[in-house]
Every structure is written in C-alpha cells, then in structure tokens.
C-alpha cells in the first residue's frame, strides 16, 4: 500500500515536471505591442543583449537592468555591448538593489512608479520566466501591463529540475498558507 502511494506521488511529480518543461516561457510575439519600459533580470546569457535589441527596435522606451553588480558602470556596459554608448546613456538604468527574483520585482516596481510607466516588458530566460512572471505579478499587482519576453536557452536537466522544485515548494507554501 505504501509503495503504491509513493508511486502515485512520484508519478504526479513527474507529470508536473513534464508540464513545467513543456510550458517554458516564450519570446514575445512579433506583433506584441510596444511597452513604455523593459526590465531585464541579470544572471543568464544573452539577456542584456536581447534587452538592448528591444530598445533599438523601439519595442520599449527605457530599460532597467535589475540586479546589476554595483561596481558596473554605464561605460562598462557600453563597452560590453560594442559601443552603444548613446543608447546606454539615454535609455538604460542600472539597478543594483536586488539579489533575487522577488527583490528584482520590488526594485522594478519602484523604478516603474518613479517614471510613471504603465507598461513593461519583462525579459529573462525561458526557464526563469514562470517564476519571474509570478513574482512580478504578485509584487506589481494589476498596476502595469506586463509583456513577457523570454530569451530562449538550452537549460540542462538539473537547471529545469531545480527551478521546478522551487516552483513546487512555492505552490505548497501558498497552499499551506505559509
């Protein structure tokens, strides 16, 4: 009896993982409406480059790089991006207050309010988008129109498994009202 119950739990967990892996974030649709702002979460490859392309393509008017190292300057960023000095100077803000996804959302909320924006494009990796969208939705409430724009990656099984475990634990905490 215990073996059957454990097998059922394992099967449900596996099915949940498969659903999670199949429902990774996607890039914004080509016809997605432009937003006033974009927020990119640091921590993964190609995120910042994609966010700058969003600015260049006028899909957003201003960019916050949330979770930037405090020692990084706009000049450092412009050098890394191959000389986009004018674009970085006019339209990019470096946020260094956040250390995790929740504090990224809090930092972005303060930045969005300070600039009186009403719409934002959220940029992060595909495997991180579900969690980011959850935190941003929870922190920002319904104050802003959020367009998700995932940077496609090839996450390893361990990356997906770790992110899925965080998702399961968060759902259990909400369910248990912790």
Image (tube, rainbow, N blue to C red):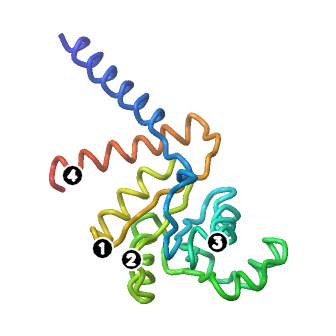
Q: Position of residue 12 (x, y in %)?
A: 30, 24
Say which quadrant the C terminus sits in: bottom left
Q: Position of residue 77 (x, y in %)?
A: 74, 77
Compared across the picture, whether 20 is left or right of 41 comes to left
Label 2 or label 3, whichever comes before in sequence order: 3
Spatial CA distance of label 4 from label 2 is 28 Å
Spatial CA distance of label 2 from label 1 is 7 Å
Compared across the picture, whether 89 is left or right of 6 comes to right
Q: Position of residue 132 (x, y in %)?
A: 43, 58
Compared across the picture, whether 160 is left or right of 164 comes to right
Label 4 or label 3, whichever comes before in sequence order: 3
106 to 158, vertically: above or below: below
Label 4 or label 2, whichever comes before in sequence order: 2
Q: Which residue does the image show at 51% across and 39% down from the upper left?
A: 160
Mark 4 lies on residue: 174
Spatial CA distance of label 4 from label 1 is 22 Å
Spatial CA distance of label 2 from label 3 is 17 Å
Mark 2 lies on residue: 118
Furthest toward the left, the residue is 177
In the image, 119 versus 98, the foreground residue is 119
Closest to the camera, between mark 4 and mark 2, is 2
Res. 114 image quadrant: bottom left
Mark 3 lies on residue: 55
In the image, 99 versus 146, the foreground residue is 146
Q: Position of residue 39 (x, y in %)?
A: 52, 70
Say which quadrant the N terminus sits in: top left
Mark 1 lies on residue: 143
Spatial CA distance of label 4 from label 3 is 36 Å
In the image, 162 versus 121, the foreground residue is 121
Q: Residues within 10 Å of mark 4 (few under 14, many from 20)?
A: few
Label 2 or label 1, whichever comes before in sequence order: 2
């Amino acid at each position: 009896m215990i073996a059957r119950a454990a097998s059922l739990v394992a099967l449900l967990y596996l099915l949940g993982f498969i659903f999670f892996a199949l429902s990774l974030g996607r890039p914004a649709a080509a016809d997605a409406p432009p937003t006033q702002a974009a927020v990119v979460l640091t921590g993964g490859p190609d995120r910042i480059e994609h966010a700058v392309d969003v600015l260049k393509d006028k899909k957003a008017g201003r960019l916050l790089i949330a979770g930037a190292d405090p020692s990084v300057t706009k000049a450092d960023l412009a050098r890394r991006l191959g000389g986009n000095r004018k674009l970085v100077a006019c339209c990019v803000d470096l946020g260094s207050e956040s250390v995790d996804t929740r504090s990224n959302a809090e930092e972005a909320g303060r930045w969005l309010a300070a600039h009186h924006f009403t719409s934002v494009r959220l940029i992060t990796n595909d495997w991180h988008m579900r969690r980011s969208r959850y935190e941003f939705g929870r922190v920002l409430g319904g104050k802003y129109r959020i367009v998700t724009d995932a940077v496609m990656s090839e996450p390893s099984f361990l990356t997906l498994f770790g992110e899925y475990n965080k998702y399961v634990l968060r759902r259990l905490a909400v369910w248990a009202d912790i």
